[in-house]
Every structure is written in C-alpha cells, then in structure tokens.
Amino acid sequence: MSNVNYEIRKSVTVNFVGRYSNLLIQVIVTAVLARMLNPSDFGLVAAVAVLVTFVSFISEMGLGPAVVQFQELTSAQIAGLFWFTIILGAIVATLFVGCGPLIAHFYGAPKYTRVALALGPTIALSCWVIVPLAILRRTQRFRAIVSIEVISAIVSGIVAILAAFHQAGVFSLIIKSTVFSILMFISCAVRSKFNPFIRPSFSGMLHVYSYSGYQFLFNLVNYFTRNLDKILIGRMMGAATLGIYDMSYRLMLMPIYNLTHVIGPALQPAYAAQQQDMATIFVSYQKVIRLLVIVGGFVGVVSFFCSRDIIYLFYGDKWSAAVDIFAILSLSICVQIVLSSSGAIFQSIGRTDLLSLSGTLSALTSIPAIVAGAWTGNLKLLSWFLVISFLANAATTFFILARFGFKRTVYELFRPSIGCIAGISTLLAVSAAFKMTHTFGETSSLLLTAGKVLVIVALYWLLARLTGDLDFLRKAVAPKLKNRGQPKVGFISRL
C-alpha cells in the first residue's frame, strides 16, 4: 500500500507541476490569440477539430493504454504496434484531407476545405506519437513527458502568435496545433529510446487486442457525447455562435482536462501493478476521490461566482456573450473532475469492458440532451441540458465501477467525501442567490475579482474545517515522516 501511494504521489507531483505550467502557457497564448482573432476564427477551427478528434480516436484504437497496462509486451510486439499506427495514421490523414470538400459542403463554407487540408498532418502525427508516449508513461518517466509538453507548448504558442501578428487569421490556430504535434512526436520518439527498426511481431497479443478494443469503443462513444454539441451548433447556428460556445466550454474544461492528465497517468501504472489487490486500490481511490472533490469543488465555486471576471480576464470584453454559458457549464466542473479519474481505474483493474459499457449508457443520456438543446437554438438551455446529463453520467459510471468493478456500493466509495459534497452544494446555492440579487455592473477589475476570490477562499476554508477536509489536505500536501529511514508514503495513505 505504501509503495503504491508513494509512486502515485511522486508521479502526481511531477505531473501537477508540469501540467499546470503547461496550462499557464496555454492560458497566456489563448488570451493573446483571443484578442487578435475573432470568435468566428475559433469557431471555424472548432468545427473541423471535432472531426480531427474523431479520426484520431479511430487511429488510436485504445493502443496507448494497452501498452501501459501490459508490462509483458516484448520489444518486437511494441515495434509491431508502432508500425501499425504509422501506416494507419498516414491512411486516415489522407482520407481526412480528401473529405475536405464534403466537410465544406456540410458546413456551407468553402474555407473548410483548406482548413481540413492544413489539419491533415496533425492527424497523422497524433497517431504516430501513441506508442512512444505510451512507453514513457509505462516506465513512469513523467518528468520527460512534462518537459516535452511544456517546450512544445511554448514553441507552438510563439509560432501561432507570430502567425496571427502577420495576419494568418484562422490558420494561426492550425499552425499552433501542427507545430505542437511535430515537436511531441519527435521528442517522444527520441526520449523513449525505443528502437522501431527491429523485426516487428503481431503474435501473442490477443488479450491486448481485446483490451484495446473495449477502450476504442469507449473512446468512440465518448467522442460523440463530447463533440456532438459542437457539430450541431456549427451546422445549425454558425461559426460565430460555435466560437462563443466552444471558448466557454474549453475554459470550463481547463481544470478538468489538466487534472485528468495529472491524476490519470499516475494512477493507471501504479494500480495496474496491484490489480490483484482490489482492496488496496479501493481504499486508495476513495482518498483520490476526496482530494478531487475538494479541489474540483473550489474551482467550480470560483468559476461560477466569478464567471464574468474570468471571461473578461481571459478573452476580453468582446466575449461577453460567453459569460452566462461559462457560468452554467462551471456548475459541472466538480462532477467532471471526479468523473475524469474513473477511466484510469477501469483501465488499471483490467475492466475496459465496463468502461465501454459506462460510456455507452452515458451516451444514452448525453446525446438526447445535446440534440434537444441544439434544436431549441438557445445556448443557455443547451448548457443546462449538458450539466444535467453530466450529473446523470457520473451516477451511472460510479454505480458500474463500484458495483461491478470493486463489488462495493457507491456510498462506500464516496463516504469520505460526503461532507465536502454537501458543503460545495450549499456554496453554489448561496452564490447563485447572491448573483441573482446583486450586480457589479458590466465591467470587471482585478481588484473586484480578487475580493470575490478571497470571499470564496474564506468560506471554503471554514467548510474544510467543519468537514475535516483541512486536516486531510494538510496531511496530503505536506506529510510528516516520523521515521526518516522508512520509505516515503504518499499523500493518499498518510491520513
């Protein structure tokens, strides 16, 4: 137990520093580009990026998590998987570029043909990097991954800003994506020290294909539930409206996406090595959930209460239409942060079949919500439907994980976090009531924003004292070793 948690703590620490350094870079670059470009530029790329994500999922086929999960794979077998992704990535990218005129016809704008052509290399590179990146994760070389991502983000961001300065318009966003993908592939291939030129082997991997198949089905279903809204908004409401929605959604996803990449990569390899000891994984994951609830709750409350300030700070006042959309979506931040960790648990206990099942059931809730919201033509109503679907998806996923994965109950899984969940719900209700009865005008300032955040910090500190979460955090963040000669114990176990 101690060794598992120590590895998790060490990996999470590295991932946290790197991921949020990367987040800071992305925030700065996006803030600059948002002032140089128009909402329609972001909407144009967002519409095609949905399709890029789709074909990338098809190309990936769940092979990345499979390489991490199965430690017994030989170098020849890994080489076989690598060359498979090389060939598949080239084929899929070529087909995507060839479908450019069809994409332009679907959205009713010829410019989409050139956008699809420019995004072709990104698709191929996102497939080619799968195996080298998985090797780095498999060996838990998170420092290498962090340095690669940060350097790639800095260089691609600078290039994109320079391109926008020289009037590249929408293509500055595409250049950013392409440069990032190129740097990621080259760096991961070099740092993984993987030799792809040995004789590849495709035999003896039936269990890998089965595992990756279920992962692929989940990715495919999850793609539709995460991107159908953008497809329909782009088709029915236009690029400008999609730009407003997509930038609000992306801002809401920032803490979710980055915490996922901090926690998830650390959990799977550590838990995969202990997959025969389900009791250890269960107890450890209870504490991971508690930590995510505390962090996600704080981010969610601040995002909801300070929605106008955040939008104006990040994007500028010409994005005022995004304020209410962001505020509504931020109500789901805590739920989504906790939910985002479940995939790594399904993977680490070898139950990607349950992961696929949970994704399918979630789609039955999300897709009707998205279609109904898009049909109304009202972004606010669509956002409310999405928030409700996220809550339903979380309930379904954790029921499946607890009941069929751990053979326990959802109450047992969330018991340490119940007090904090109740407190977060109360703070959100109070924040909503305050926002409905008070107004701070149409503008925002750093001083006003800082004052709001300090109020939330004070209330959250009081909540954490009452629930015992303050002591939990203190032990998690700064554990005190009683015996210096003993192995360090992670933040999950020192409670």
Image: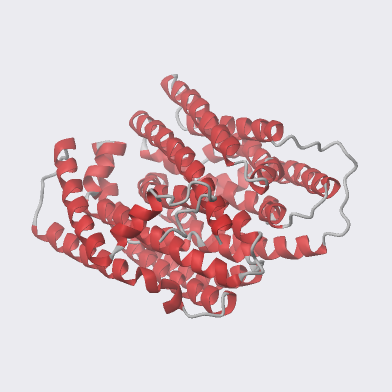
Q: Quadrant of residue 426?
A: bottom left
Residue lying farthest left? 438
Residue 191 locus on image (x, y percent):
68, 33
On screen, residue 23 versus residue 100, left or right, reads left
Q: Is residue 324 visible?
A: no
Total labels: the figure holds: 0
Residue 53 locus on image (x, y percent):
58, 49
Quarter of the picture containing the N terminus is bottom right
Q: Is residue 135 visible?
A: yes
What colour scheme does the image use?
secondary structure
Residue 228 locus on image (x, y percent):
50, 59
Q: Nearer the viewer, residue 66 or 444?
A: 66
Q: Quadrant of residue 61?
A: bottom right
On screen, residue 116 versus residue 423, left or right, reads right
The residue positioned 35% from the left and 59% from the top of the image is: 472
Q: Is residue 95 above or below residue 36?
A: below
The residue positioned 39% from the left and 74% from the top of the image is: 415
Q: Is residue 393 above or below residue 251?
A: below
The residue positioned 65% from the left and 71% from the top of the image is: 353
Residue 69 locus on image (x, y percent):
69, 57
On screen, residue 436 versus residue 289, left or right, reads left
Q: Nearer the viewer, residue 215 or 268?
A: 268
Q: Nearer the viewer, residue 105 or 78?
A: 78
Quarter of the picture containing the C terminus is bottom left
